[in-house]
Amino acid sequence: MTYLLRVNLDINASNIGGNLRFQNTLKGIRLVSKRSNRVVILAHRGRPSGRDKKLSLKHFVSPLSKGLGKRVVFINSFDFPKIAKRIVQSPNGSVFLLENLRFLKGEFGADKSLAKSLATLGDRFINDDFPTSHHKNTSNFELPKLLPSSVGPNFKMELEKLDKVMRHPRKPIVLVIGGAKIKDKLGVVKNFLPKANSILLGGAPANTVLKARGVHIGKSLYDQGTFSQIKRFAMEEKLVTPIDWEVKKEAILDIGPETIKLYTKIIQGAGTIVWNGPMGKFEDKPFDRGTKALYRAILAQKGANILIGGGDTLAAIPLPRKLRKNLFISGGGGAMLTYLSGAKLPALEAIK
Ligand code: ADP
Ligand code: MG
């Protein structure tokens, strides 16, 4: 039996070993890979257009081999008939890693012929990549329609934890949304409006709503694509925007001290806190201040249920050494928000 295992390796290559997503991915592979089967790991990194050396999955071969305690064979080509033959001829227990799927244009969107080629590589499909599940990609949306499919251990745990918090959420519910991928985020913010009590905005989502509210944002990052849609609900009172900010070269790069105070006060009254997206351009110090301050404020809420997720969000904060019962760190950002908002996850629908 050969399993095609879709995992998340959308990770900055500089600190693979210490990365929570990587640790989870490793655990998932370990649970699926047995002496009696073969595993073909399918994954992506970044949003390349065509082959891009910087986004190769080659860097993961060694940390994966080390973590699994067995050799991981890297497959660099997309010559599917050849790859299929190689896999079938390999001994049981083998683990293969296929190059970044997004080097193939067909991976974006839903390419039925690419899905057919991928399906020739194995007998069953397991999706353990929760963070990508809100995207309709070929490997997570078309492929599961062609093979017996199921969700993997990480994906399942994510759904269970998120369900548990949201079934009877402690009120008030406070959402904190920042970051850059506005399209993924502001769409679901609308779904949250009836559920959440306050939605605190930072990063590009804040800039976009500020602009929609008529504030001059200069050269700040905002989303033009969704702007007209956002204008329709930008005046909603539950959407809380920054009252001051840090600027460099006419661009808003972080929330300011008064905003930190205001947001902290709202967080202090919360029963449930959901956070995705850094409050500022945290990689560029000192614009990490807002993100760090809010993280402290959120962790200080010992009585609240806390959900934190997002690749960059997790990279921006020091993860607590000891996880608490009411604190869940999700691997997903956009996927977490989509699921919590009640919208369907295409990757999950394709398996059901
Ligand atoms: P996540 O991965 O946690 O879901 P995103 O991918 O949406 O978050 O966004 C993370 C990025 O957002 C970071 O690289 C950060 O620098 C950027 N960012 C946040 N606020 C700003 C801002 N005001 N201006 C420019 N970039 C920002
Ligand atoms: Mg990100």
Image (cartoon, helix red, strand yellow):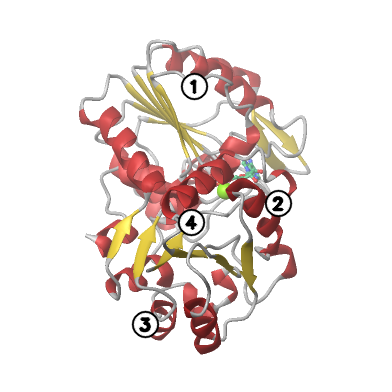
Judge from the rendering whether residue 258 lies leftward or rightward of residue 230; answer left or right.
right
Question: Residue at (21%, 25%) from the top-left corner?
Answer: 168
Instruction: State the residue position of label 2.
Output: 13
Q: In this view, does 142 lie above or below 191?
A: below
Estimate the spatial distance between the alpha carbons at disc 3 and disc 4, rounded to whole Å: 20 Å
Sequence-wise, the earlier of marks 2 and 1 is 2
| Numbered disc 2: secondary structure | helix
Instruction: State the residue position of label 4.
Output: 7
Residue 45 horizontal/vertical position (percent): 60, 60
Instruction: State the residue position of label 1.
Output: 323
Tell whether circle 4 marks a residue whose Cβ is less than 8 angstroms from ligand 2: no
Instruction: State the residue position of label 3.
Output: 112
Q: What residue type is labelled 3?
A: Lys
Residue 184 horizontal/vertical position (percent): 44, 52
Q: Which amino acid does label 1 sit on?
A: Leu
Q: What residue type is labelled 4?
A: Val
| Numbered disc 1: secondary structure | loop
Question: Which quadrant of the structure image shows residue 250?
Answer: top right
Question: Residue reaching furthest bottom?
Answer: 81
Sequence-wise, the earlier of marks 3 and 4 is 4
Q: Nearer the viewer, residue 85 or 346?
A: 85
Q: Which of 228 and 276 is in front in this view?
A: 276
Estimate the spatial distance between the alpha carbons at disc 2 and disc 4, rounded to whole Å: 16 Å
Estimate the spatial distance between the alpha carbons at disc 2 and disc 1, rounded to whole Å: 25 Å
Sequence-wise, the earlier of marks 4 and 1 is 4
